[in-house]
C-alpha cells in the first residue's frame, strides 16, 4: 500500500488547519453537537444536550421534532416548495419528477391511508419494495405518524423477511406487485405472500402497482396502494415526537446467527446525518445528488432519504441494474440530470473498470464536482480510476467510513469544511465531533503504521439507541471489548501523517459487493439443508465484489458429494438468505479445522482459499496457537486435495 498523497493539486486545506478545527469539536462534544442541533427546526427545544449512561445515549432529551416535517413541510415555507425533491428513473425508461410540494401531497395521502388502517405512534411497519418513489414516501409517511419503519432489502428471501416482520411485530407490510431488474420482473408480492403465511402480527399488505402484471391479492388482507390513497384529501399533521423516539429499525448481520435490529433515534440521528451530509458532500442549493445504494441498506436511509431531504436537495433515484440495458446507463443518467454529486460503492467502480473506459467516454460528466465511496475499503487502483475517468481529475473523492450502527459517516474527507490533501485508499481523518483511536487488543493505542482496531471514544448523536429488544446485546457487542469505547469491528492503521486506513472487518462479518453478511448466519442457513451436518463459511478475495462466499460443508452420513448437490445447496442459500448471498464455491470435506475447544478456525479457511500461508494470518485476534493452526491447515489441505 502506498501512502503517498495524490499527485494532483485540488484546493486543499493544510492538515493542521483541519486538525485544529477538529480538535476544538472533540474537546467539547456537547457544545459542538448543540450547535449542530440548532440547524434543525425543532417544535420545542431540548432540556439537556446529552444523558450518557454508557452505552445508552439520550441526545437532546425533551426536544420535540418530526422527521417528515423537517424533510418535507419545512421546505414549503419558501421557494423550495417548487424545487425538485426527487428525480426518479425507472429501469424501463419511465421517469417521474416530484417537487417538494408534490412530495408533501403524496406523503400526506399515504399517512392518512395508514392512519385509516390503524397505524399509530410507535407501531412498526415493514417494507419490501423496489427502488420506487413510494419507498421514501412511505418512510416519511410513517415518520409523520410516529410509526417506526423497518425496510427489508428486496434481495432478502421470504424467510429473512418473515423473521424481520415477526421480530418487529409489524402490523402492516408495504410491497409492490414486482420490480424491474435487468428487464425481468422480480416477483416481490409472491415472496411477501410466502413470508406472511407465518407472521400473525400482519393485518394488511399494501401493494404498489409497479409492473402491472398479474398477481394474487388476498381478499381482506391485501389492498392496492393506489386504491387507499386515491380518496385521501386531508393533510395529516406531523406528530411531534421526543428526540429519543425511534425513527426506524434496520437489521444488520453480526457475529451470531441472528441479525440485530439496529434502532435509530429521531433527534440525534437527524442532527447527525444533517451535519455530516453538509460537511462531506458540500451540498449547495443547485446540487443534484445521486446516491445509488439501495434504500434497503443504511446508506439509502441516511443518504438517499433523510439527509438530502432535510437539506432540501434534489435527489436522483434509479430503479434498476447499473449496466442495463447497456453498460453506460449510469453515465447516461449523470449526463441527463447534470448530476453534481455521486455517492457509490467500490464494487460498482470495479465493475465499471472491468467494463472499460469506452462506456464512460461516450458521456459528458463535466457536471460532477464531488465523488463519494462507501461500504468497503476502496483499493487505490479503483480510487485512481474513479478519480481520473469519472471525476476528470477535478472532483475530490470522499471515501466515507461508517456503519449501520453509527447512523452516518464517521471518517471521511470533509470538503464542506476544508478538504485535506487526499491519499487514494485512505478515508483520511475523523469528522468533527468524532473521537477516534486505533488500539491493540488491550486497548492501548498502536504506533503509527501498525494495524489495530478502530474505536470511538465518545458518544455521537448518530449512534444507535440500542439493539431492538436486546439492550444487553448492544452493550456486549459494541461496548464491552474496550470499556467505555465503541468497538466497530474493523481493522485500521494510522500512517505517519495521521491518515486513517480502514482495512476491513476484524470479526466474522463479510462484505460481499458491499453487502454485510455474517458468517454464522450463512452457516446456519447451510446446515438447515437436510444433507448438511456441519458447515463453515469463509470469504475469498474477489476482483470486483471485494469478497465472495466460500462454503466448506460436511455432509450427513450416507450422503455423497456431487455437483448436483452443490447446485442444490447454492439454491438453498439463495432461498434461505437471498440471491446476494449465493456462494461462489462449495467444498465438500469430511472434517472442519477446529481448535481444541471446538471453534471452527475460519482464519485458516480464509488463508487457505486466498492461497496464503499460515504466516500471513494476523496474530491479532488468533487465540489459538500457531502450531494448532498449522496442523489444521495442513490436514485440511490434504483433505481438499482431489
Ligand atoms: C465497511 C455501510 C472501508 C466496514 C455504511 C464497516 C468500509 C462496514 C467503508 C459497515 C469504507 C463501510 N472503507 N470499509 N469507506 N465503509 N465499510 O453496516 O467494514 O453495511 O464496518 O454500513 O462496512 O457496513 P454497513
Image: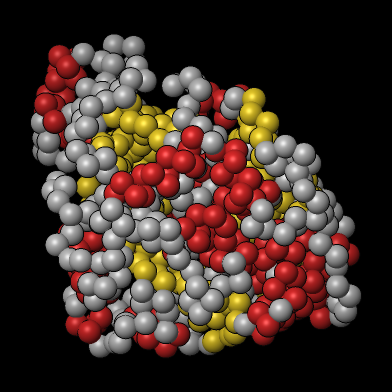
Q: Give the percent coordinates (x, y) of residue 265.
A: 66, 45
* Front one among 233 and 397: 397
Left or right: 169 in relation to 629: right
Q: Give the percent coordinates (x, y) of residue 545.
A: 29, 56
* Front one among 417 and 357: 417
Left or right: 183 in relation to 95: left
Seen at 45% across and 65% down, the residue is 282
* Front one among 418 and 475: 418
Locate the C terminus and report the quarter of the image it occupies: top left
The colour style of the image is secondary structure
Q: Give the percent coordinates (x, y) of residue 563.
A: 26, 49
Q: Give the percent coordinates (x, y) of residue 555.
A: 33, 33
Residue 377 can be seen, yes or no:
no
Seen at 37% across and 20% down, the residue is 443
Seen at 67% across and 66% down, the residue is 71
Q: 240 above or below 358?
A: above
Amino acid at each position: 500500500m502506498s501512502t503517498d498523497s495524490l499527485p494532483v493539486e485540488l484546493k486543499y486545506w493544510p492538515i493542521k488547519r483541519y486538525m485544529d478545527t477538529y480538535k476544538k469539536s472533540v474537546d467539547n462534544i456537547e457544545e459542538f453537537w448543540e450547535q449542530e442541533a440548532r440547524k434543525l427546526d425543532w417544535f420545542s427545544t431540548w432540556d439537556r444536550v446529552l444523558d450518557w449512561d454508557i452505552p445508552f445515549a439520550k441526545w437532546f432529551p425533551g426536544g420535540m421534532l418530526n422527521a417528515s416535517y423537517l424533510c418535507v413541510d419545512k421546505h414549503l415555507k419558501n421557494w423550495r416548495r417548487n424545487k425538485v425533491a426527487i428525480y426518479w428513473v425507472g429501469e424501463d425508461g419511465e421517469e417521474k419528477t416530484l417537487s417538494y410540494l408534490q412530495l408533501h401531497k403524496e406523503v400526506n395521502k399515504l399517512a392518512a391511508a395508514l392512519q385509516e388502517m390503524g397505524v399509530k405512534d410507535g407501531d412498526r411497519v415493514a417494507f419490501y419494495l423496489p427502488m420506487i418513489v413510494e419507498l421514501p414516501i412511505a418512510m416519511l409517511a410513517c415518520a409523520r405518524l410516529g410509526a417506526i419503519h423497518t425496510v427489508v432489502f428486496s434481495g432478502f428471501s421470504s424467510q429473512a423477511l418473515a423473521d424481520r416482520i415477526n421480530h418487529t411485530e409489524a402490523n402492516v407490510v408495504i410491497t409492490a406487485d414486482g420490480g424491474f431488474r435487468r428487464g425481468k420482473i422480480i416477483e416481490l408480492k409472491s415472496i411477501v405472500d410466502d413470508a406472511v403465511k407465518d407472521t400473525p402480527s400482519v393485518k394488511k399488505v399494501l401493494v404498489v402497482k409497479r409492473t402491472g402484471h398479474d398477481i394474487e391479492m388476498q381478499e381482506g388482507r391485501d389492498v392496492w396502494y393506489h386504491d387507499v390513497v386515491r380518496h385521501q384529501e386531508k393533510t395529516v399533521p406531523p406528530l411531534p415526537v421526543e428526540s429519543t423516539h425511534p425513527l426506524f429499525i434496520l437489521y444488520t448481520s453480526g457475529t451470531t446467527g441472528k441479525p440485530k435490529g439496529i434502532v435509530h433515534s429521531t433527534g440525534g440521528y437527524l442532527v447527525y446525518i444533517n451535519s455530516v451530509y453538509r460537511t462531506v458532500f458540500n451540498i449547495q442549493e443547485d446540487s443534484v445528488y445521486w446516491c445509488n445504494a439501495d434504500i434497503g441498506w443504511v446508506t439509502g436511509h441516511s443518504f438517499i432519504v433523510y439527509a438530502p431531504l432535510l437539506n432540501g436537495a434534489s435527489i436522483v433515484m434509479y430503479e434498476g441494474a447499473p449496466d442495463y440495458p447497456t453498460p453506460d446507463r449510469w453515465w447516461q443518467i449523470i449526463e441527463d440530470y447534470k448530476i453534481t454529486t455521486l455517492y457509490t460503492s467500490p464494487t460498482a467502480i470495479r465493475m465499471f473498470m472491468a467494463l472499460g473506459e469506452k462506456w464512460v467516454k461516450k458521456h459528458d460528466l463535466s457536471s460532477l464536482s464531488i465523488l463519494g465511496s462507501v461500504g468497503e475499503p476502496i483499493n487505490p487502483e479503483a480510487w485512481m480510476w474513479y478519480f481520473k475517468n469519472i471525476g476528470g481529475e477535478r472532483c475530490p473523492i470522499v471515501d466515507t467510513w461508517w456503519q449501520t450502527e453509527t447512523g452516518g459517516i464517521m471518517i471521511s474527507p470533509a470538503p464542506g469544511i476544508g478538504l485535506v490533501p487526499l491519499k487514494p485508499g485512505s478515508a483520511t481523518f475523523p469528522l468533527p465531533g468524532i473521537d477516534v483511536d486505533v488500539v491493540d487488543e488491550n486497548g492501548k493505542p498502536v504506533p503509527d503504521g501498525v494495524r489495530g482496531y478502530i474505536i470511538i471514544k465518545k458518544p455521537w448523536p448518530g449512534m444507535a439507541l440500542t439493539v431492538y429488544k436486546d439492550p444487553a446485546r448492544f452493550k456486549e457487542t459494541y461496548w464491552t471489548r474496550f470499556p467505555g469505547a465503541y468497538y466497530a469491528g474493523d481493522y485500521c492503521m494510522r500512517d505517519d501523517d495521521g491518515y486513517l486506513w480502514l482495512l476491513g472487518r476484524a470479526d466474522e462479518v463479510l462484505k460481499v459487493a458491499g453487502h454485510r453478511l455474517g458468517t454464522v448466519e450463512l452457516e446456519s442457513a447451510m446446515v438447515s439443508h437436510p444433507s448438511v451436518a456441519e458447515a463453515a463459511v469463509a470469504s475469498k478475495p474477489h476482483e470486483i465484489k471485494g469478497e465472495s462466499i466460500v462454503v466448506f460443508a460436511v455432509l450427513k452420513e450416507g450422503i455423497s458429494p456431487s455437483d448436483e448437490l452443490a447446485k442444490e445447496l447454492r439454491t438453498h442459500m439463495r432461498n434461505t438468505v437471498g440471491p446476494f448471498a449465493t456462494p461462489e464455491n462449495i467444498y465438500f470435506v469430511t472434517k472442519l479445522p477446529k481448535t481444541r475447544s471446538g471453534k471452527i478456525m475460519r482464519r485458516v479457511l480464509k488463508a487457505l482459499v486466498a492461497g496464503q500461508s499460515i504466516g500471513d494470518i494476523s496474530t491479532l485476534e488468533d487465540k489459538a496457537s500457531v502450531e494448532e493452526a498449522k496442523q489444521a491447515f495442513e490436514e485440511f489441505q490434504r483433505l481438499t486435495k482431489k
